[in-house]
Amino acid sequence: MRRGLGHPVVVGSHENATGELAHALRAAVAGDVDFSTTARALTSMDASNYRRVPLGVVAPRDADDVAAALAVCRAHEVPVVARGGGTSIAGQATGTGVVLDFTRHLSGLVSLDPEARTAVVRPGLVLDRLRDAARPHGLTFGPDPSTHSRCTLGGMIGNNACGAHSVAWGTTADNVRGLDVLTYGGERLRLGRRWAGAPAGLRELVERHLAPIRTGYPEGLPRRISGYALDALLPERGADVARFLCGSEGTLGVVTEAVVDLVPLPAEPVLVVLGYADESAAADAAAGLLPYGPLTVEGMAADLVRGARGLPRGGAWLFVEVDGAAPAAELARAADALDSLLVTDPAGQRALWRIREDAAGTATRMPAGASTAVSGGAGEAWPGWEDCAVPPARLGAYLRDFRALLAEYGLRGTPYGHFGDGCIHVRIDFDLWTPAGVGRFREFSEAVAGLVVSHGGSLSGEHGDGQARAELLPRMYGDELVTLFGEVKDLWDPAGGLNPGMLVRPKPLDAGLRFEGLPVVGLGREVARCVGVAKCRVDGPSPGADVMCPSYRATGEERHSTRGRARLLHEMALGEVITDGLRSEEVREALDLCLSCKGCRSDCPVGVDMAAYKAEFLAGHYARRPFARPRSHWTMGGLPHWLDLFGRGLNTALGLPFAARLAGVTPERPLPRVAELSFTSWFGERASDRPPALTLWPDTFTDHLAPEAGRAAVRVLEAAGLGVTLPPGRVCCGLTYVSTGRLGTARKVMRRALDVMAGSTGPVVVLEPSCAAALRTDLPGLLPDDPRAARLASSVRTFAEALEELAPDWTPPRLARPVAGQTHCHQHAVLGDAADRRLRRSVGLEGDLAGGCCGLAGNFGFEPGHYEVSVACAEDRLLPALRAAPPESVVLADGFSCRTQIGHLAPERHARHMAEVLALALDEQ
């Protein structure tokens, strides 16, 4: 390794040298050492535009492990980067050497002292887990980035993270009391005030440069994150070495433990939402609210929220949290807003805050007509100029100039963020796929850096410089101070082994972009939309009905998160780390535990659709290799065909010894029984004089396995005055073929269904949510050139939607009982359940259904090797909700899989489709 260059070169970085490094690490470290293709692919990117492929990943168990890993890497002249949740957006959580993953073992809360209002934390501790522990004591950790459910304290310290409450509680640096740090050279330092823990020579270096340090940092900037915070080492500021290290992006030392301050929770939080005519008016007003002592002043405009409900009148809004109803009312009166809304209900506040917290993802999806109309580029926006900050009083003027600069370059973005601190986030529709587009990205970055500096601002106001902005730091600080940053780096890390290429002596801002070499069409292009904000990595309590990501919540492994799978598919498309394309076993193994729940389709802020990607991958993986497929793909995946062919005769076959093994399914589950009389046979034997108002789709599950739900639906629909007919022939939505990646067969099945439905008009009611979702999305997606597919998709209605739309005056029977159960994951993700919730209220069913996924998920829970994960998914939310429900509760589960899972794991509870519940209530009248 070349000394002092800041760009370490791995000596002998061929396969043998890498193997020797891995062997030495395994001998020295008690934690996990993983140099596999999967591990390298999973950590090649963070939430930025950049990509750096590491040699391997080490998950240390304690500080001694960290020291041992550093010693081995030092001996082998290999660089090291510390990584928490991997949500950094400037590239600083990626590295070409060894990645230290602190989330696996070093993720604990060491202690919490309510009297002293402090906590001792490990670097991999997720922020929300600290907040959960502090909440019973009326305390919290002040900084709260929108990624609070998955970002770690170590990452927050590295980036000096802030969040919405920074106007009241400051940045992470303002809330850190002490740090235990290991340097690349092996020193153990305990950092604090009055030069505590400073390495030899640091004090002397600072004292030689007091003048530029005192004069070189812009004033009036609550959000100055760029560069090293050398002003924290000034004698008049207490020479606080711990505060100085915050925001150094892992380039100086590795944090192994931290003492942090806690702050009191607001006693009576009130959310004041203020509506203004436009973004400029909201920005101009923000600074004027600060004298009223707000806890937050967040801003966003209509081009970000795009149709969000519950907001007051206006084209832009400020979200202002105030402690107390009286101060909130006073602030609202003084705000000079077009309209205002005061929200005291916690659930209402959470719903509104979610709009803001999802902005980092939703801002990535541009409406149709985005300016980068290049191949594969339109409709998406990216980080790259993400979080500059100016003095709050300058924010309105800066935003007007910024919007003008976007227009000058033919770009679009949706600014939002911490208006009270003058900090703006924005995703911009850069074309990062073509050389010309990348060149324009550089030109714009240089221009906007000059604009920020002209307004007295900071290039980074929250997420750090990393590779994205560090090259431009001389524009902000001047050459003298930036040269001093380099001297500081060399003093702490003379070998240049910690996170080289970040912040100091950085690589060019347009080098190493993750889009380079990626196909602009196809699966690789699709997965590139994952920007890495990692909402799929939430592993603790998650309020509401979110589904994503059940397999990650069950295993806690990155490769089983939506982001992890997207990263593997990304690397597969590039072909550098994963070299066997669609034949990749690494990708197949990661996708094996994907339940195809479709939760990411709605819960992922950027709409990653892993169920669709999995189906496409499986189709390619087994192309021209039919006998390589698992047997369950032919049995469970072909269930509609076998049921139509054999009907109840399957019961005899399934009762034979070794039936499960022959069918390629797990013996841990009883196989479903085929009904003696199918729903379509029952319907054909009855007579009705009602003219048909709708077509009831006889899905495979309802027809052969749960005809009682179909009979009940007919009973209720006719009671509501609606005539029912069935399709004139056998139909199937193709779901089981899609989920097993038999896409050619799925298209044939779908076309046959379209032929049968050719003469049908009016609404098509589908009782099984997974089939309704397949008809709404998979059908037009797989047959985009067949106009009949779009027509049928648009005609699909759920049972509750049909009653509400076609029988608006019908009064359902009253039950007045508590309700428990689960909203089907496909319904949550694709169909929505607003009509179902209104129907339950009208019937008098009280309470909410559980979110998440039941874990059976069609064929998933029946396949070998899936049983434990399937049960863990049910234990996440469904089963606890059933145990907590009163004995008299009605248990609802419209999905056949959900009802089957409940029958297997909670047999004391009898789950029913909503149609069955209403039919029973009608019979009791």
Image (cartoon, grey):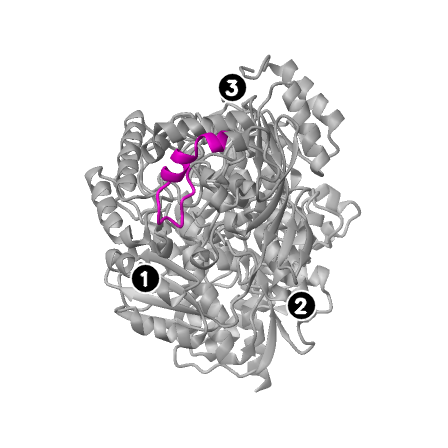
Label 2–label 1 contact, CB within 8 A:
no
Residue type indicated by callout 2: Leu
Residue type indicated by callout 3: Gly
Q: Label 3: which residue?
A: 4
CA separation in Å, label 2 and label 3: 61 Å
Q: Which numbered mark, 2 or 3, is in the foreground of this view?
A: 3
Q: Which numbered mark, 2 or 1, is in the foreground of this view?
A: 1
Q: Label 1: which residue?
A: 317
Q: Is residue 844 visible?
A: yes
Number of the label disc, if any, that sits on residue 882: 2
Which is nearer the eye, 571 or 858? 571
Residue 359, percent from left and from top: 40, 52
Residue 388, percent from left and from top: 35, 44
Q: Is residue 271 left or right of residue 676?
A: left
Label 1–label 3 contact, CB within 8 A:
no
Q: Residue at x 23, y 63 (%)?
A: 277
- The first of marks 2 and 1 along the sequence is 1
Residue 736, percent from left and from top: 55, 48
Q: Secondary structure at mark 1?
A: strand
